[in-house]
Amino acid sequence: MSVGEICNREVIVIQRDETIVEAAKLMRQYHVGAVIVVEKRNGLQVPVGIVTDRDLVVEILATELDEKVITVGDIMPQEIFTIKESAASYEAIEFMRRKTARRLPVVDDAGELVGILTLDDALQLLSEELLDLAKLVRYEQKKETRHRP
């Protein structure tokens, strides 16, 4: 299964020059824990950063900085990890583990943002696959019992 098949296509985005208050409002409005920072490049919406609810608490609230003047670009990490929508889901999970990333913006071949893969998405996929395996074991046990009483 590819990342494009399991990622969330409804991504909440923000521009680098928006305030962190605006980021917080978007997170609240859409019930998400992160916004993807994007910029336009050749008409494409390209991810350049990510800001999480944890960033807002740890970087701003805990240090008592003035949230009205700090922009998303001021606090977003300088490095962003993305994954192509054509990548296999197991590759994405391994990549998330290696990079200790709970969220990965998903891009197409041109680098344009098309979705987001979260730890929750990966956990749901894995739990469904484990459930399918458990059902197979039960089915095989019942099948054997019917054929070999």
Image (cartoon, rainbow, N blue to C red):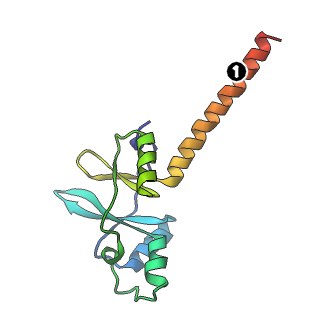
In the image, residue 30 lies at what x, y percent?
48, 65
Q: Answer yes or no: is residue 117 visible.
A: no
The image shows residue 122, relative to residue 11, as above or below, that is above
Along the viewing direction, whichever of 13 and 74 lies nearer the viewer: 74
Along the viewing direction, whichever of 10 and 137 lies nearer the viewer: 137
Looking at the image, residue 143 sits to the left or right of residue 70; the answer is: right
Q: Residue furthest right?
A: 149
Locate the N terminus by quadrant.
top left
Tally the marks.
1
Q: In the image, what residue type sits under mark 1?
A: Glu
Along the viewing direction, whichever of 95 and 116 lies nearer the viewer: 95
Disc 1 residue crowd, few under 14, some 14–19, many 20+, Cα 10 Å: few
Looking at the image, residue 148 sits to the left or right of residue 21; the answer is: right
* Residue at image mark 1: 140
Q: Answer yes or no: is residue 94 visible.
A: yes
- Tell me the quarter of the picture where residue 75 sits: bottom left
Looking at the image, residue 146 sits to the left or right of residue 13; the answer is: right
The residue depicted at 42 percent of the width and 52 percent of the height is 98
The residue depicted at 27 percent of the width and 52 percent of the height is 112
- Tell me the quarter of the picture where residue 133 sits: top right
Q: Residue furthest front?
A: 98
Looking at the image, residue 92 sits to the left or right of residue 132; the answer is: left
In the image, residue 148 lies at what x, y percent?
79, 10
For label 1, the SS is helix
In the image, residue 34 lies at what x, y percent?
44, 65
Locate the C terminus by quadrant.
top right
The residue depicted at 57 percent of the width and 37 percent of the height is 129
